[in-house]
Image (spheres, rainbow, N blue to C red):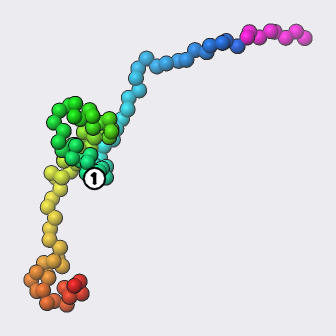
Amino acid sequence: MFTRPRAPAPVHTAVHRHTTRATRVVIARSTAYDALSGYQKNRMQNARTDADWAAIEKDVPGARAMYASAQRARATTPPTTKDPMDALCDADPGAIECKAFD
């Protein structure tokens, strides 16, 4: 039987490129802000312009959203109430429960 000759493989193969850029989604949480170093937190607190934030975003993607989320979380956190043991020891420092913690 006769076999059909195959065409030689092309030297260059076409690379398909998408015409749209891929989007990058950054999920920022205030808990991630707490894990940052003091240096980065200080930079975020002192950032005033978009150029400042752009420089920070190079190092920490999503930093601006993370900072805003942390600020909202701090603003909505209710003040902590006093621990009942502290209230007991303030009222009666000689109580047995207070001596156990000395």
Q: Which residues are magenta?
A: 1-8
**Is residue 4 one of those drawn in magenta?**
yes
Quarter of the picture containing the N terminus is top right
59 or 72: which is nearer to us? 59
Percent from the top left, x then y, of residue 70?
Answer: 22, 48
- Residue 95 found in image quarter: bottom left
Q: Which residue is at a point 12% across and 86% down the rendered structure image?
A: 93
Residue reaching furthest front?
39
Q: Which residue is at a point 46% across and 19% down the rendered structure image?
A: 18
Tell me which secondary structure the magenta stretch mostly adopts.
loop
Residue reaching furthest right?
1
Task: Please name the residue that numbered disc 1 is placed on.
Answer: 34
Instruction: Check the image and report above or below for 78 versus 17.
Output: below
- Residue 28 found in image quarter: top left
Q: Which residue is at a point 43% across and 17% down the rendered structure image?
A: 19
Find numbered disc 1 in the image and state the secondary structure of the residue it sits on. Answer: helix
